[in-house]
Image (spheres, rainbow, N blue to C red):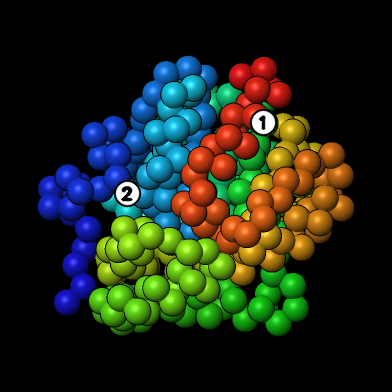
Amino acid sequence: MAKRLDWARDGTSWPNHEHSRFVSAAGVRWHVQVMGRGPVLLLVHGTGAATHSWRDLAPLLAERFTLVAPDLPGHGFSAPLPYARMSLPGMAEALVELLACLRMSPALVLGHSAGAAILTRAALTGGLAPRALISLNGALLPWRGLPGHVFSPTARLFATTPMISRFLSWHALDRKAVEGMVASTGSVLEARGVDLYRRLVGDTGHVRATLSMMANWDLSLIERGLSELRPPLFLVVGEGDRTVSPREAERVRTLAPDAELVELPGLGHLAHEERPLAVGALVLDIAARQGL
């Protein structure tokens, strides 16, 4: 039977748990990991993930930065926002409130997949003013064609039908199903990485939050604002990404022509989990070029 994540039971085996804390902001009890010393670097994971996504990358970057990595609302060990606020503006506003509560102003921000969209939205509204924004396999533009017309309505139906969340969580008890989910991203993870995703997808609340984000997502807000983005934008793309096509980066550059594209050969959507050393070196190089 699927189990809800519980910090008292599951926290001691969570990656980097010794750096975890719980903070209340924006009506949410957040699980946040803070580690290291130096300029503040904010890490924001994507839809359906959690702080475990940075398990190997975070300690590397903490040698140079003060890292702040939250579980997004409803994900991992963080409580959810109300359904209507599980949107791009709602998540961005809540994240800005969290940082204000922590009294931290990031000098550099790194977002994976939908996390990159959240950071971009926060930068466009002035809630964040980093020296640079790194989009790692970022999902920044609306789906094209038929998926764009089907994706959100289907997710909306699933998110508002509790039985579907429970069914998906029960399905996660089948390890091969989770292995297939990871493989579909174009990435290859070690057994521990697969097990952590299995624990997440086995939590009905986490699944419901993932579906709620998908149902409320409107990337046209990013599409309309990209030309006004002030921080330098770095598009880091895994060439083998099967979740967000590497070609999407070229679409982004038509709207933000000054954005710099960096390709990661042989890596998929979860590039930072596959090759943390390579991604870490790239982040440090970008930081150094920004005087950090």
Three-letter code, disc 1: Ile
Give the x, y percent position of residue 231: 72, 32
- Residue found 48% across the figure and 59% down from its top: 47
Can you say whether 206 is above or below 30 in the image?
A: below
> Quick one: label 1, few (<14), some, or many (20+) residues within 10 Å?
some
Picture quadrant of residue 153? bottom right
Quadrant (top left, top right, bottom left, bottom right) of the N terminus: bottom left
The three-letter code of the residue at mark 2 reads Ser
| Identity of the residue drawn at 75% across and 55% down | 249
Which numbered disc, 2 or 1, marks the residue that appears first in the sequence? Answer: 2
The answer to whether the residues at label 2 and label 1 have Cβ atoms under 8 Å apart is no
Q: Nearer the viewer, residue 289 or 70?
A: 289
Label 1 element class: helix
Where in the figure is residue 278, as x and y percent of width and height? 56, 42
Q: Could you say which disc has been placed on residue 286 in the image? A: 1
Cα separation between marks 2 and 1: 30 Å
Q: Quadrant of residue 128?
A: top right
